[in-house]
Image (cartoon, helix red, strand yellow):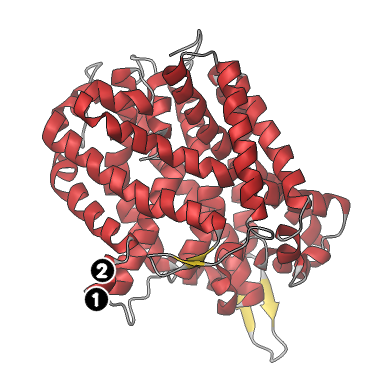
């Protein structure tokens, strides 16, 4: 169901809005900590290879399905083949799960931005600050509410008045801010009490230089799963977002050119995000700081800002402002996907569905907030990690469902519908699809096999072998 004016105004509008989805927390929060966790340069190398192969295939598939069917994810697969409509329901489940915690993370970012606005931020650099905040009863819910309200308002205004205009205003400034902080990180130096000096350029070397020492098959598969899960997250594929955005794209848009621009844009921002964070953490905290995991942003970086002296506070304000914008673009994309699908499913106007999705998001986000205090538990996950409520939602959506959805999608397109269905849509206006041969080969033979392996890794099955 499309309301009047629900098409992007042109190729640049689609690219900016889609890239805005990609440049969110997935690149600026998730990419650096996974890169640090998995050895810096080795993870970066694997990720770049995946972008040029799997990323191109999955992104092209999702956007082409959306534009060809002019339907959102919930209905698009049914339009392709009625027997495969269950795949639309699986795809719809991913943003439904992600929406439960995205606004919670956005609330954390909002909290840190406000902290540095009203104070010098020294408290944020103390060891227990982040834990004390997320385990408190009220504060996380309040900041989540602020972030969620802004997200709902943008989605409420619709594609052209809300998402596209927001992306056109925010994205150029966001990229400039990332670039400035990334360059600044390379100029940092720090001298330890023993006289040893660490520099931002040494941190850059850690970031871009692959280290193959001690690499085993099991370890490589773990890195591959992390890199692929990051690819799903940052390109917003296999979760219905790009199918939804594709359904808004006008037929005259050069789809091949647009998807190539999104690939380049997304990968460039991911690289800059790593260059912005990893060298700075290396300078002030050494390699030990790389082990901070998902808390790299909220625990390690405040220490970095505190060590910068007089420059720390303005840099921190700029950083968390940028993080807030990035998280907002991603959360808007997830909520838009849910709203658009519900509009088709229930044949209700955008305003009513936006209200319904907003209420759902509010209730589930409160539960996620309570997962750090009143509803706290620890659960061993099949991939070997231990998590609580937010981690469980992230695991199910990102490590379990997305590889499974990609596996099924590749079988549907590669062996049931046929790759030429996608190729013809990309070449609708007689554009030349230079990578058509690579696409046909990947979607039929490579994607299904690799996604099956990654799905088995995510379920812990490969632990029985390696």
For this rendering, which residue is in front, 296 or 308? 296
Q: Percent from the top left, x then y, of residue 227?
A: 38, 58
Q: Residue, x 13% and y 32% (percent of image)?
A: 416
Q: Residue, x 29% and y 48% (percent of image)?
A: 404
Query: Do the CB atoms of the residues marked 2 and 1 lie less than 8 Å apart?
Result: yes
Q: Residue, x 26% and y 60% (percent of image)?
A: 456
- For numbered disc 1, what is the local secondary structure? loop
Residue 199 falls left or right of residue 5: right
Q: Percent from the top left, x then y, of residue 256?
A: 30, 29
For this rendering, which residue is in front, 355 or 214? 355
Q: Residue, x 72% and y 61% (percent of image)?
A: 135
140 lies above or below 462: above
256 lies above or below 428: below
Residue furthest front in the image: 374
158 lies above or below 379: above
Q: Percent from the top left, x then y, of residue 248?
A: 42, 19
Mark 2 — residue?
462
Mark 1 — residue?
466
332 lies above or below 294: above
Whether residue 305 is visible here, answered yes or no, is: no
């Amino acid at each position: 169901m499309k309301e009047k004016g629900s098409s992007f105004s042109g190729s640049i509008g689609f690219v900016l809005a889609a890239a805005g989805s990609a440049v969110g927390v997935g690149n600026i929060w998730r990419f650096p900590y996974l890169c640090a966790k998995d050895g810096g340069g080795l993870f970066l190398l694997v990720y770049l290879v995946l972008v040029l192969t799997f990323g191109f295939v999955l992104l092209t598939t999702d956007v082409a399905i959306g534009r060809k069917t002019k339907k959102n994810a919930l209905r698009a697969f049914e339009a392709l083949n009625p027997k495969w409509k269950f795949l639309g329901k699986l795809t719809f489940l991913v943003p439904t799960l992600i929406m439960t915690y995205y606004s919670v993370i956005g609330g954390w970012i909002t909290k840190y931005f406000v902290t540095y606005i009203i104070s010098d931020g020294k408290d944020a650099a103390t060891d227990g600050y982040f834990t004390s905040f997320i385990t408190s009863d009220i504060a996380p819910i309040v900041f989540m509410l602020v972030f969620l309200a802004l997200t709902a308002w943008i989605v409420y205004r619709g594609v052209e008045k809300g998402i596209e205009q927001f992306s056109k205003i925010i994205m150029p400034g966001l990229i400039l801010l990332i670039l400035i902080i990334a360059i600044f990180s390379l100029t940092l130096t720090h001298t330890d009490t023993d006289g040893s000096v660490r520099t931002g350029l040494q941190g850059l070397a850690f970031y871009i230089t692959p280290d193959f020492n001690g690499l085993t098959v099991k370890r490589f598969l773990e890195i591959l799963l992390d890199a692929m899960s990051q690819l799903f997250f940052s390109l917003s594929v296999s979760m219905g977002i790009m199918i939804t955005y594709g359904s808004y794209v006008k037929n005259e848009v050069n789809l091949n050119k647009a998807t190539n621009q999104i690939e380049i844009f997304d990968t460039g921002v991911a690289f800059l995000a790593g260059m912005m964070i990893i060298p700075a953490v290396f300078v002030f905290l050494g390699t030990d700081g790389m082990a901070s995991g998902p808390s790299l942003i909220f625990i390690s970086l405040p220490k970095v800002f505190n060590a910068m002296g007089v420059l720390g506070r303005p840099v921190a304000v700029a950083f968390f402002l940028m993080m807030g914008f990035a998280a907002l673009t991603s959360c808007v994309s997830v909520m838009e996907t849910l709203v658009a699908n519900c509009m088709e499913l229930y044949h209700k106007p955008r305003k009513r569905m936006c209200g319904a999705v907003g209420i759902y998001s509010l209730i589930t986000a409160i539960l996620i907030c309570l997962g750090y205090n009143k509803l706290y538990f620890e659960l061993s996950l099949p991939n070997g990690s231990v998590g609580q409520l937010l981690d469980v939602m992230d695991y199910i959506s990102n490590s379990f469902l997305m590889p499974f959805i990609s596996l099924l999608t590749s079988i549907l397109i590669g062996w049931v519908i046929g790759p030429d269905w996608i190729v013809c849509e990309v070449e609708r206006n007689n554009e030349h699809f230079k990578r058509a041969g690579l696409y046909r080969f990947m979607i039929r033979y490579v994607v299904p096999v690799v996604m099956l392996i990654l799905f088995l890794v995510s379920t812990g099955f490969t632990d029985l072998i390696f």
